[in-house]
Amino acid sequence: MISYISASYVYPVSSGPLKEGVIALDSNGLILEILTAAEAQSKGISDVKFYEGILVPGFVNTHCHLELSHLEGKIAKHTGLPGFVEQVIRQRQADDAAVIDAMETADRKMYAQGIVAVGDISNKLISKEVKEISGIYYHTFIEAMGFNPEKASDIIEAAKIMKKAFRPLNASIVPHAPYSVSDNLFKEISREAEEHQDLVSIHNQETPEENEFFEHKSGSFLKLYEFLGLNIDFFKATGETSLRSYLPKLSPALKTLLVHNTFTSKSDLNFAKENHRGVYWCLCPNANLYIENKLPELPLFLAAGVKLTLGTDSLASNDQLSIVAEMKTLQEHFKISLADLLNWATINGAEFLGIEDRFGSFSPGKTPGINLLEFVDKDGEMWITGKIKRLA
């Protein structure tokens, strides 16, 4: 059975907005046709369900920590990253049933918020059963971390076992962050990723202390290592920023997601463009405000012309897992068009995850999900209010 829906605007993403455009779809949400209002009228299509608002494809959340959902409301805001990490370590342990219940609730809420695909960070296998029955597509990034170079072999072997256990779900082994992965472990992770042509993700420059640690071996990370009981006498300052220090250790042939980028500079952006052709940059603005009370310098990314995606991070560092809320925050803080925001929220994330044949835009043959966004007109620009309804 074919149904027809329309709205004030239909935004295919693959093309510009269509005023009162019409989407033809089957009962499974498969897009059959995208029509202008005139084309629909010329075909004599009259049984059209009309909505006030903007119809957009389902959202792709490229960075989430589903297994931290039980920490919602438990972590203090504006502590800075080292303090945040210490709080998570202190409070992370919980009964498995409580963790699973929190993940199931978070998964359902993401689905209701119009999210169709998620790049999810996992340190344990516990999220598998939630992902297997979810209506959301998941790619799991299995985090390998360990700053002691002598433990690299054991860490990568444990990660490989977990990756195998996640089957048949898609998963890849990735480094947690430059300050938590030894050179030896970076080599092991890169070898594994290149062998399987896997996706790579890494937390990048989320705090100024990260750059300070690599440049001078000073700052708050020294206290964090002390808290963790780690002897880092082996580590020598590189005299370079974090990004310049670790990016050459990752294969430039693989799609690589740099996450947060709160303190990434223009020179870092240029370095990445010159040395790694597969980089995508994920912004998680509400988490950045939650932890560091700081947003990335978005104009630098726009000027550099890099590929941006959006993420929510976790409920340990965010009040909700909503891509619409992330878009709204960016629109409130920067002069940014809805067209750009939608590209970051849909097709760019789908391309990074390698699922653009199904998600990311309204195109015949895709089942991208359909969301209705409420908007207001401000001086000829469409501003989203944050209200969303999932239609398919």
Image: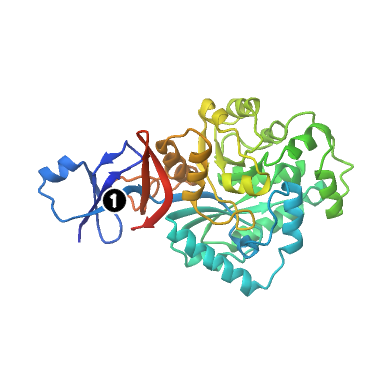
**Residue occupied by mark 1:** 52
x%, y% of residue 183? 76, 41
Tell me how the rendering is colored: rainbow
Q: Is residue 195 above or below residue 270?
A: below
Residue 144 placed where, x, y %?
Answer: 69, 52
- Front in this rendered view, residue 111 or 29: 111
Three-letter code, disc 1: Glu
**Can see residue 284?**
no
Residue 201 seen anywhere in this rendered image of the structure: yes
Residue at position x 57%, y 71% from top?
A: 101
311 sits to left or right of 388: right
- 237 left or right, relative to 57: right
Rendering coords of residue 270 (x, y %):
61, 25
Q: Based on the displayed image, in which of its 4 quarters is residue 266 positioned?
A: top right
Quarter the C terminus occupies = bottom left
Q: Residue at x 65, y 60 (%)?
A: 161
The answer to whether residue 116 is left or right of residue 28 is: right
Badge count: 1
User: Which image quarter: residue 66?
Assistant: bottom right
Q: Which residue is drawn at 45% across and 45% down?
A: 350
Quadrant, the N terminus: bottom left
Provide the secondary structure element on which disc 1 rests. strand
Q: Which residue is drawn at 13% across and 50% down?
A: 45
Crowd around label 1: few <14 · some 14–19 · many ≥20 (10 Å): some
Q: What is the residue that sits farthest to the front in this orientation? A: 379
The x, y position of residue 13, in whole percent, is 36, 40
Give the camera-side residue of 262 and 275.
Answer: 262
| Front-lying residue, 392 or 377 | 377
